[in-house]
């Protein structure tokens, strides 16, 4: 329809006239009566035609512009805007096929690591049963900030063997898992900053999804065999002005690189030079060792947010995360958590406190680690001589691929042979081009709930394929 023929009926419409006209513009654009790009008449002309004041038309145009229905250009006038594209639907972090990870039939799904069944469900169920008898009227109230202090104290004792430097209960925030903790830190640190987050060039997709929720853009920082490269972090921070960086020092996901003490010190030096806030994601560092290097939180307690959880140690379904804030930021973190989810529920904090205080958490973790070590030994045997990278206690393997292999080809051939893995492209940060400072490879999640002999066969098939090259594949 030509705009000269458009004559909306504003009579009988509830509310002010400008709102009725804005609604009419929206409906005309939605239905296609007024096509995108249609130039709207000058305000005085439309006001005369509709028998309203020019001010009414001006307010209607402004309201329609605020909704994205109309766009105005100085010196050119106002036009019907093109429809805004719907935001993309976020991709899930998990795969539906993992609903039955231990099935003997079908492909061997090694996309996501699975902890072994060490009787966690029974032990957790026993504690929940005992806890249920002690719940009282406090369950009827919202969780005040101080109510979880006993659970924080238990968590502090639980983490006492980690090289994090001086940490107090006041520094801690309890979250619904590590992913929630990372999102919470981004919400805090990006509130008054340009929405930029520096990430590892190959990074866990949960990091990029958390940044996207905050409307933040991720900036890739190059990696080597020790993880994030300090000189490139310096370059990206200097060029972009970004003030938040997220990294995994002990078990880089997916490459399994681990930072030396010197590398950690260099990262901290760059962070101080540019006044960066640092998210230290240590969810995949569940096995403290006597020779473990100090955490970034120990080296720079004034700026490091340390994230850990029980999901990679005890049970993935136990959504319990621990965020250690920079010195003096614990209260701000707990207030932000309260704004986010009103605090963890009393049954969860009570359960975790019981698990930790009774020693059951440590016993479960020990059993899990024993079985993970056994599966890692299978992987190291299957990939001997191929440069595969692992970390103690982490049920994942990074398998670099030599030319002429590409990760996409390897994953496709492996799937045809009945083994599903994840290629480099699944972890490439936005803005990171293929081959730009990162080798082709696949991440293999050790499915510890799969029968041991079946896992061994799947790993051997991948190792044989990597050795034989893309023209042959496994026999």
Image (spheres, rainbow, N blue to C red):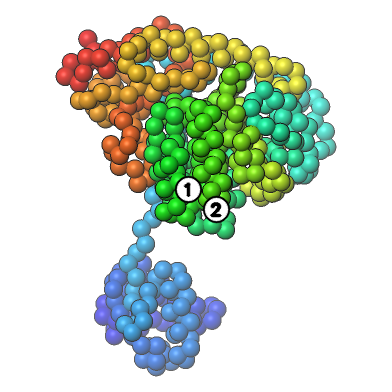
Give the answer, above or below, for where 383 lies relative to 53.
above
Q: Say which residue label 2 marks.
A: 190
Q: Residues within 10 Å of mark 2 (few under 14, many from 20)?
A: some
**How far across and down, in percent of the image, does residue 375 sit?**
46, 12
Instruction: Name the residue located 63 percent from the left edge and 47 percent from the top edge.
Output: 340
Label annotation for residue 79: none
**How far across and down, in percent of the image, does residue 21 sit?**
44, 79
* Identity of the residue furthest to the top in this view: 453
Instruction: Name the residue located 35 percent from the left edge and 78 percent from the top edge.
Output: 73
Q: In which quarter of the image is residue 318?
A: top right
SS of the residue under disc 2: loop
| Label 1 close to label 2 by CB (< 8 Å) | yes
The quarter of the picture where the N terminus appears is: bottom left
Q: Quadrant of residue 405?
A: top left
Residue 358 in view of the camera: yes
Give the answer, above or below, for where 38 lies relative to 187.
below
Q: Say which residue label 1 marks.
A: 197
Taking the image as shown, residue 184 lies to the left or right of residue 387, namely: right
**How far across and down, in percent of the image, does residue 266 sit?**
51, 37
Between 71 and 243, the residue placed more toward the observer is 243
Instruction: Name the residue located 25 percent from the left edge and 23 percent from the top edge.
Output: 402
Taking the image as shown, residue 315 lies to the left or right of residue 388, namely: right
Between 392 and 142, the residue placed more toward the observer is 392
Give the answer, above or below, for where 382 lies relative to 432.
above
Answer with mark 1 or mark 2, whichever residue precedes in sequence: 2
């Amino acid at each position: 329809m030509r705009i000269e023929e458009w004559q909306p009926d504003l009579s009988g419409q509830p509310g002010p006239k400008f709102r009725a006209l804005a609604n009419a513009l929206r409906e005309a654009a939605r239905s296609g009566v007024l096509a995108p790009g249609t130039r709207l008449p000058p305000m005085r002309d439309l006001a005369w035609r509709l028998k309203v004041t020019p001010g009414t038309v001006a307010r209607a145009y402004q309201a329609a512009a605020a909704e994205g229905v109309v766009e105005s250009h100085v010196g050119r006038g106002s036009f019907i805007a093109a429809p805004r594209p719907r935001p993309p639907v976020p991709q899930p972090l998990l795969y539906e096929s993992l609903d039955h990870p231990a099935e003997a039939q079908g492909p061997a799904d090694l996309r996501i690591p699975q902890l072994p069944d060490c009787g966690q469900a029974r032990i957790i169920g026993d504690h929940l049963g005992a806890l249920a008898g002690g719940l009282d009227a406090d369950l009827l109230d919202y969780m005040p900030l101080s109510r979880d202090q006993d659970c924080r104290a238990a968590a502090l004792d639980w983490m006492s063997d980690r090289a994090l430097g001086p940490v107090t209960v006041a520094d801690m925030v309890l979250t619904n898992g590590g992913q929630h903790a990372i999102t919470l830190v981004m919400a805090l640190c990006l509130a008054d900053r340009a929405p930029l987050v520096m990430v590892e060039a190959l990074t866990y997709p949960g990091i990029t999804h958390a940044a996207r929720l905050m409307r933040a853009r991720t900036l890739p920082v190059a990696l080597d065999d020790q993880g994030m490269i300090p000189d490139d972090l310096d370059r990206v921070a200097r060029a972009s002005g970004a003030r938040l960086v997220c990294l995994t020092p002990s078990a880089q996901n997916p490459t399994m690189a681990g930072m030396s003490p010197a590398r950690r010190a260099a990262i901290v030096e760059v962070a101080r030079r540019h006044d960066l806030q640092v998210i230290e994601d240590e969810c995949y560092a569940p096995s403290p060792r006597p020779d473990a290097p100090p955490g970034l939180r120990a080296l720079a307690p004034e700026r490091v947010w340390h994230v850990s959880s029980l999901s990679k140690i005890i049970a993935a379904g136990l959504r319990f995360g621990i965020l250690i804030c920079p010195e003096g930021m614990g209260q701000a973190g707990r207030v932000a958590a309260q704004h986010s989810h009103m605090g963890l529920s009393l049954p969860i904090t009570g359960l975790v406190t019981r698990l930790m205080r009774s020693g059951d958490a440590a016993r479960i973790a020990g059993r899990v680690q024993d079985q993970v070590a056994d599966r890692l030994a299978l992987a190291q045997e299957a990939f001997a001589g191929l440069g595969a990278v692992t970390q103690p206690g982490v049920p994942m393997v990074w398998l670099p691929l030599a030319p002429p292999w590409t990760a996409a080809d390897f994953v496709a051939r492996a799937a045809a042979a009945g083994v599903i893995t994840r290629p480099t492209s699944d972890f490439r940060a936005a803005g990171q081009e293929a081959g730009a400072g990162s080798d082709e490879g696949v991440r293999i999640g050790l499915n510890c709930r799969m029968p041991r002999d079946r896992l061994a066969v799947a790993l051997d098939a991948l190792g044989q394929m990597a050795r034989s090259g893309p023209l042959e594949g496994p026999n």
